[in-house]
């Protein structure tokens, strides 16, 4: 299915390029990753997200280390414990391991939600700037070089990434 979609897109792209050569269309491209990486608010958002990741990782490491210490202590004492105590300790260790796993899953979901929340307004701002530059430059289509859209050839003459960045840094005016 993916091959069919790629083939359809490629065919459509050839048609667009043929029309562009006849002067009917003007096509450009932007690297949205470059634009987002250069925006101060995106850098701030990325730093905030990285701090969250660090805090989550530190907590997981702390809990994992404590679990490992308990497991090592149990291993050393297991020969001296009766069967009921062994089973209770194994259950306790298993529950703690499951707790760490659950915590990791919850934090990954929380981080993904936070990333969406923080980045969505920035992406909207970038897309609005792209649309504005496209209208100013009278472009019919703008491709995003950063995504999986197959760009067969991209002449730097039609790279509008820095025009979009310039517009955003000037405050969108």
Image (cartoon, helix red, strand yellow):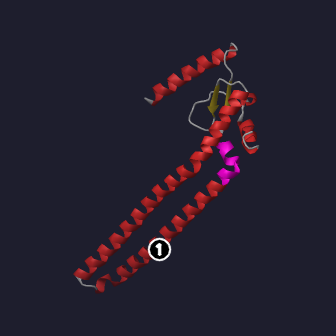
Name the residue nearer the viewer: 29 or 156. Answer: 29
Q: Position of residue 77 (x, y in %)?
A: 34, 84
**Where's the N terminus, which quadrant?**
top left
Which residue, given by chain and number where applicable, does mark 1 sit on?
65
Front-most of 79 and 113? 113
Residue at image position (31%, 78%) is 89
Give the x, y percent position of residue 70.
40, 78
Instruction: Residue at 74%, 36% (x, y): give it.
Output: 163
Is residue 142 among the parts visible in the rendering?
A: yes
Tell me if residue 164 comes above or below residue 84 in the rendering. Answer: above
User: Residue 130 is drawn in which quadrant?
Assistant: top right
Q: Main secondary structure of the magenta part?
A: helix
Magenta region, residue range: 33-43
Q: SS for tag 1?
A: helix
Q: Where is residue 44 in the image (x, y as percent from the top left)?
A: 66, 56
Residue 35 sits inside the magenta stretch: yes
**Camera sees residue 30:** no
Q: Classify mark 1: residues with Cα within 10 Å, few (<14), some (14-19) or many (20+).
A: few
User: From this viewpoint, which residue is outermost toward the bottom?
Assistant: 80
Residue at horizontal 67%, vertical 53%?
43
Q: Quadrant of the C terminus?
A: top right
Residue 149, picture quadrant: top right
Q: Residue at x 46, y 30 (%)?
A: 2
Image quadrant where residue 90 sits = bottom left
Left or right: 54 with respect to 3?
A: right
Outermost residue, front side: 173
- How many numbered marks does the figure carry? 1
Residue 135 x %, y %? 69, 27
In the figure, 31 relative to 26: above or below? Answer: below
Residue 161 drawn in magenta: no
* Rendered position, 137 above or below 172: above
């Amino acid at each position: 299915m993916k091959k069919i979609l790629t083939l359809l897109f490629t065919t459509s792209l050839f048609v667009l390029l043929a029309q562009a050569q006849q002067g009917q269309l003007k096509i450009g491209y932007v690297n949205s990753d470059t634009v987002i990486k250069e925006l101060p608010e995106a850098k701030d958002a990325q730093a905030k997200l990285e701090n969250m990741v660090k805090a989550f990782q530190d907590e997981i490491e702390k809990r994992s280390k404590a679990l490992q210490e308990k497991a090592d202590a149990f291993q050393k004492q297991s020969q001296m414990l009766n069967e009921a105590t062994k089973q209770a300790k194994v259950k306790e260790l298993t529950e703690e391991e499951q707790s760490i796993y659950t915590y990791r899953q919850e934090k990954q979901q929380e981080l993904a939600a936070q990333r969406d929340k923080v980045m969505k307004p920035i992406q909207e701002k970038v897309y609005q700037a792209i649309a504005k530059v496209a209208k100013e430059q009278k472009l019919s289509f703008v491709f995003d070089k950063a995504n999986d859209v197959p760009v067969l050839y991209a002449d730097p003459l039609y790279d509008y990434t820095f025009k979009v960045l310039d517009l955003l840094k000037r405050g969108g005016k």
